[in-house]
Image (cartoon, rainbow, N blue to C red):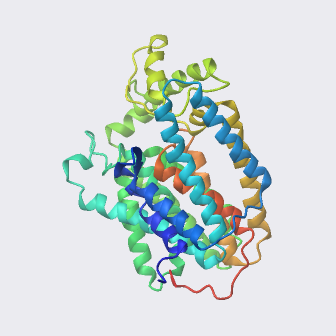
Amino acid sequence: MKIIKSENFIYLSIIASPLYLLRFEFFGIPTNLLEIIILITFLVWLLEKNCFKFNYTKILFLIILLFLGLISSAILKENHTTSFGIIKGWFVFPILFGFIVYNKINSLKKSKNILFSMFLSSFIVSLFSLIFYYYPTSLTFDNRLRFFYPSPNYLAMFLAPGILVSFYVIPFFKNAFWGYFMLAIMILSFYLTFSYAAWFSVFLSSLLSILFIKNIFQNRKKFRLIFLSIFLILILFIFLQADTSKFQDLINLEERSSLSSRIIIWKSSFKILSDNYLLGIGAGNFQEKYLDYQQYFPPYLEWAVPQPHNLYIAFWLQSGLIGFLAFVGMIYFWIKIILFNILKAKNDSKKRLAITLLVTMSYILIHGLVDTTYWKNDLSLFFWIIFFLALKTSQIKPSSLLKKKLFR
């Protein structure tokens, strides 16, 4: 059947990424629906008799080092089950999926469909989060939208990449109105999370794109319009929040503000790191260690803290020094490759694709300074999609057949 192709299962996996929340056991092994879909995608890919190819030896070596760090950190700690469950769900499956994307996506049209799948997934979550806005569990005690996610920040971190890839996706809509309508729904849901860190990270990463897209648009008015729109949206967000207690607590650095809480978490994280800088504490063990280290600090403002609110500290703590250095090395080589693609690409569509991937990854890395924008099933999946798709972009030959219609 024509529909049973690994390519279609790739798109389905991305669209269905929030389904990791549907958990169950398979032959006694804890898993979830997203992992099952990825596994089916892999099996279909194998049945197609595809050959595994990967042309970046240094990055492959660093990925192996990352796993070495994760496994060695997990083995030497007590909570093996949780650590290896996290390694399976947040590393093995997403990286396996990334390799499939790298080997299967070989045209700009397929790359476009990958980003549209991310866009569509974010839109679906946004739409349902607004439909169920008044459902009791959709809001936190301070009326922030979280839908079915553990916190509003997680919802914002899921929506942000979908919003950013719209820069590449919307021009391919036959009727641009529907693209902008979907984006408006996503922005509204994104706003209702009141996740200031996510807002500013999207803004800063969007500004980064300005450095490059001005060379794509011959019409300078269009370029200025994009810049002005991004700036005005942020100003509107701030204006609507100016009188709220959350915003006032932030700018006045109140003792119980979210920033004050994060500062305490970071201090505790650095203390834990100083005592475990070589091997880390193992994936999934931060909450327990965080509570153990309460004795060294004044009473915590926040007690339920599964992650250290910093992407880089999280990698160091949960994969040791080896894993952290491997992660930093991968990002370094990735940025070199994507910048080379942007500067050397002669095809506008290919250049815009590379810029979109850079901007989306920049968001993950910028927001990662104050949140853990990786350590969750769907977030890790999006990370590796962006990572591997960018590596493949440099090898994609521009096609004159790329038309403004999705999933053709």
Residue extending farthest top: 295
The x, y position of residue 209, in whole percent, is: 63, 61
Residue situated in front as seen by the camera: 181 or 28: 28
Residue situated in front as seen by the camera: 222 or 40: 40
Residue situated in front as seen by the camera: 310 or 241: 310
Residue extending farthest front: 27
The image quarter in which residue 53 lies: bottom right
Residue 311 visible? The answer is yes
Q: Taking 361 as reference, is 40 left or right?
A: left
Residue at point 53% right, 65% down?
Answer: 43
Residue 209 visible? The answer is no
The x, y position of residue 120, in whole percent, is: 43, 68
Residue at point 50% right, 40% down?
Answer: 86
The x, y position of residue 110, in whole percent, is: 59, 76
Residue at point 39% right, 16% down?
Answer: 299
The image quarter in which residue 143 lies: top left
